[in-house]
Amino acid sequence: MPEESKHDGPEADPLINAFADFGTTGGLDSAINEFIDDNCEHFEGAEEGGEMKLKWTDLHRQYVETIELHLETFCKEVRIVTFRPFRSARAAAWGLTLALSQSIFDMFRISVIAGYSYHETTAETMFQLLNDVNNDDSLNQDFVPQVIKLCEYPFFFVNMKEAADIRASKHEANALKSEDEFNLSGCYQLCTDLLNVAEVEKYYEFTGCPWYFRKIIVAASKKLSDIVVLHEPEEKLVFKYSLQFFGRKNKEYVLDDKLVESENMWGKVIETKCFQDNASNNVRIQAVKPSYAPDGYSENTFEWEEVDGERLMCWRRRIYESMDDKDPLKDNDGEPIGPALYFRPMEGTGSPSRK
């Protein structure tokens, strides 16, 4: 068993703690979600790489202005001096990354958020610092891209498109629901009363998630929403959801037990294989030889589970040290490392078979 604090970092700087709190409990995430919900209908049926509509670019401009307004509020709250040359969306994204970069923060003792800085400096120096962030191999590249993309058009487009798609998928999920076989299709709500925050924290710490992102992810996990599952038994499983701050996700898994390359939730390409285990009545998604288990695999399972007399869908994550292991990695207390998230079927989506 690796040391408990193997991937942990130093105590968070007050500025980074303040941003983490602002990003998950302040108005920023609510404003972004409200904007997307109000305007995603314009992206229904949109295709990546297709013709870009003027309406979309105009909405992107409004979206960036919304983010800048809230970041400006945050900067005023923590008394950061305005630094006007960096008011572009790209500079905002890179500046946000720099603020969350432990290594750069320690090296230069300078924090930049969306073009705001504690110290005035030249544009040439500042752009060099931003470039250093982009080329710094010491940063955890699984997580940094999500922050970089916050203001960029591709991130905006995907989130708008996925929001529109989730609305349409709710009808499809209901149609796919079946009482005659193992089927997870449906629309769900997160059971926040069953969420073990300590398990989520411990899991992301072990997988190497930097301390400044763990704070955001743990808070975001409490507000997982818009959960839709489209399950075609033996064929594929589509899992769609909205994760606070990190946007909408749409993951499709072909259940053929073949090793393929796919993107994880952070946009990193990994090798996975997916299959339906009929003996255990669950769907398994295995990531082969991740960085935190180089000789083993991590596994996500989706299944029905009865909790206090109620049938719920369970999304469980586990880590295995070798490819032959059947027992998951455990902490010092003998408990498996990895959270179990429970979801309650929403009214009208049907109830699972008890076969």
Image (cartoon, rainbow, N blue to C red):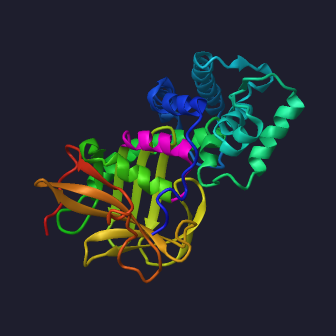
Left or right: where does residue 92 sit relative to residue 265?
A: right
Left or right: where does residue 218 sit relative to residue 148?
A: left
Would you place residue 277 above or below residue 39 in this image?
A: below
Q: Residue at x 46, y 61 (%)?
A: 252
Q: Quadrant of residue 317?
A: bottom left
Q: How many marks?
A: 0
Could you say which is closer to the camera, residue 2 or residue 286?
A: 2
Could you say which is closer to the camera, residue 302 or residue 226?
A: 302
Asked if residue 197 is among those painted magenta in the image, a careful observer would answer no
Measured as percent of width and height from the top left, residue 39 is found at 50, 29
From which residue to which does the magenta span run?
207-225
Q: Is residue 285 visible?
A: yes
| On-image quarter of the C terminus | bottom left
Q: Is residue 45 visible?
A: no
Measured as percent of width and height from the top left, residue 51 is found at 66, 43
| On-image quarter of the N terminus | bottom left
Measured as percent of width and height from the top left, residue 67 is found at 59, 26
Would you place residue 256 above or below residue 231 in this image?
A: below
Q: Residue at x 56, y 73 (%)?
A: 294
Would you place residue 354 above or below residue 295 in this image?
A: above
